[in-house]
Image: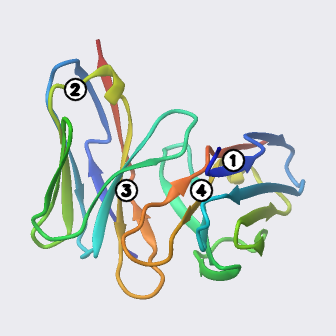
Amino acid sequence: TQLLEQSPQFLSIQEGENLTVYCNSSSVFSSLQWYRQEPGEGPVLLVTVVTGGEVKKLKRLTFQFGDARKDSSLHITAAQTGDTGLYLCAGRNSGGYQKVTFGIGTKLQVIP
Amino acid sequence: DTAVSQTPKYLVTQMGNDKSIKCEQNLGHDTMYWYKQDSKKFLKIMFSYNNKELIINETVPNRFSPKSPDKAHLNLHINSLELGDSAVYFCASSQVGGNTEAFFGQGTRLTVV
């Protein structure tokens, strides 16, 4: 079974601060996705990273896929209250019908 | 237009009852999924169907029976509900293969009392 560990699991910061969330595994994934989930809603895809070492930016969010495709990070610059939510990383394996493995999630609270 | 819609959004029922959750997607996707999210927010895949055919069954108790009448619908029937079944159940859909995006429904919060 492929496992994805996320850290930290909980994060409470002031508006304007920077933060980084990590997603680690001992397994190699063909790609890794980051989702954000707000209360009472389903997860919504933020980004997919495919190539080892790949960096993608989405406004104030920067996503990186590790060189060995076993880990990823999400960095938020100058956090805003609208960034509050549950951030989930999801690894996809290769071959056949792809099964997605989700991490435990990082619950982020941005305080005004 | 809601892309992936589930009903009901909330379900409270007694132990031992049988209940169903319905899911429909209007995205034209071939693959649909059921996920369970527990109280610690851990999202775990239960089933995956591709074009009405069961592809993934993640050692879910056979009290859970998914049914896909067509590729736009994937329903989940649960027999003899137990307290431990309380969770939020998410339906999702995606295109086949590649690194495609999964679109999730709003979830069904099931509470077994």
Label 1 vs label 2, nearer the camera: 2
For label 1, the crowd category at 10 Å Cα-Cα, with few meaning under 14, some 14 to 19 and many 20 or more, is many
Distance between the alpha carbons at the discs numbered 1 and 2 = 34 Å
Residue A103 badge: 3
Is the same chain shared between marks 2 and 4? no
Q: Residue at x 35, y 77 (%)?
A: A93
* Residue A94, quarter of the rendered image: bottom left
The residue that disc 1 covers is B86
Residue A11 x, y percent position in the rendering: 28, 31
For label 4, the crowd category at 10 Å Cα-Cα, with few meaning under 14, some 14 to 19 and many 20 or more, is many
Q: Chain of mark 2?
A: A
Give the left or right position of residue A10, taking residue B89 as reference: left
Q: Secondary structure at mark 1?
A: loop
Label 1 vs label 3, nearer the camera: 3
Residue A97 x, y percent position in the rendering: 48, 82
B16 over B72 or under it: above or below: above
